């Protein structure tokens, strides 16, 4: 009979680290953690921290920032655990939180605001009928329009058109197929044009 703890990894220091591969076991840990069991959450952390760190590092390209983001992801996951939908993988849910935390970090940076401002020219070039004033107000308009996009579409748009990531990188960060990333980007661009030409 196969054990639920079938997958083993070598942890730092050469010790064997057992990683749960059973969705039933993971869902039970989530239920216990959501009820306040910190030991269950610690096990979820151990089972997922390496993958979350890899996503954060791929997104920000900086080890210290990736460490910080990883910690923020698990703090946020602990806070929002009761909202987890058991129809999806826990790792996918964590990926979504990781990308959201990355985007929130970028929003607070001056470079992000400047890059959002540059979108005015791109959008008006792609759609000459769009009459957006070249001003501070236009950046507010674009940021407001971005907020109205569905979450996945917004993430794909920001990562691709603002941060310059390729679709294969976005697919890894968001835990989606490359084709899905392209579809989200297409949808986001269309919705942005519609919103900005109202």
Image (spheres, rainbow, N blue to C red):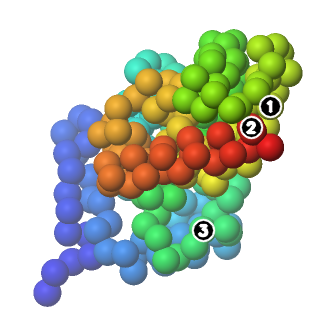
In percent of the image, x 68 and y 26: which residue is there? 107
Quarter residue 8 falls in? bottom left
SS of the residue under disc 3: loop
The image's mark for residue 84 is: 3
* Label drawn at residue 196: 2
The quarter of the rendered structure image containing the N terminus is bottom left
Q: Nearer the viewer, residue 51 or 101?
A: 101
Circles 1 and 2: CB atoms closer than 8 Å: yes
> Residue 138, position in %: x, y?
79, 23
Q: CA distance from mark 3 to mark 1?
A: 32 Å
The image position of residue 131, as x and y in percent, is 76, 27
Distance of label 3 from label 2 (alpha carbons): 33 Å
Can you see residue 67?
no
* Of 63 and 152, the residue lying toward us: 152
Is 109 on the left or on the right of 48, as rendered? right
Q: Secondary structure at mark 1?
A: helix
22 on left or right of 92? left
* 94 is higher (above) or lower (below) than 40: above
Query: Crowding near pointer 2: few (<14 within 10 Å), some, many (20+)?
Result: some
Q: Position of residue 148 (x, y in %)?
A: 73, 48
The answer to whether residue 173 is above or below residue 77 is above
**Which residue extends farthest bottom?**
1
Q: Residue at x 48, y 50 (%)?
A: 184
**Residue closer to the observer: 172 or 141:** 141
Residue annotated with mark 1: 141
Count all numbered tags in the image, as a single digit.
3
- Nearest to the observer: residue 96 or residue 147: 147
Where residue 191 appears, x then y in whole percent?
64, 48
């Amino acid at each position: 009979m196969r054990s639920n703890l079938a997958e083993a990894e070598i942890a730092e220091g050469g010790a064997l680290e057992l990683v749960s591969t059973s969705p039933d076991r993971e869902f039970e840990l989530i239920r216990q953690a959501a009820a306040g069991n910190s030991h269950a959450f610690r096990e979820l952390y151990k089972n997922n921290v390496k993958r979350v760190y890899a996503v954060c590092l791929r997104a920000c390209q900086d080890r210290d920032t990736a460490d910080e983001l990883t910690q923020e992801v698990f703090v946020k996951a602990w806070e929002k655990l009761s909202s987890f939908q058991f129809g999806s993988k826990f790792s996918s849910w964590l990926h979504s939180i990781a990308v959201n935390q990355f985007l929130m970090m970028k929003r607070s940076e001056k470079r992000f605001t400047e890059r959002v401002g540059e979108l005015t020219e791109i959008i008006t070039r792609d759609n000459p009928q769009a009459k957006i004033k070249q001003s501070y107000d236009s950046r507010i308009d674009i940021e407001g329009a971005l907020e109205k996009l569905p979450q996945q579409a917004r993430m794909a748009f920001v990562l691709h058109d603002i941060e310059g990531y390729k679709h294969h990188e976005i697919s890894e960060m968001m835990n989606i197929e490359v084709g899905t990333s392209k579809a989200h980007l297409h949808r986001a661009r269309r919705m942005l044009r519609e919103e900005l030409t109202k």
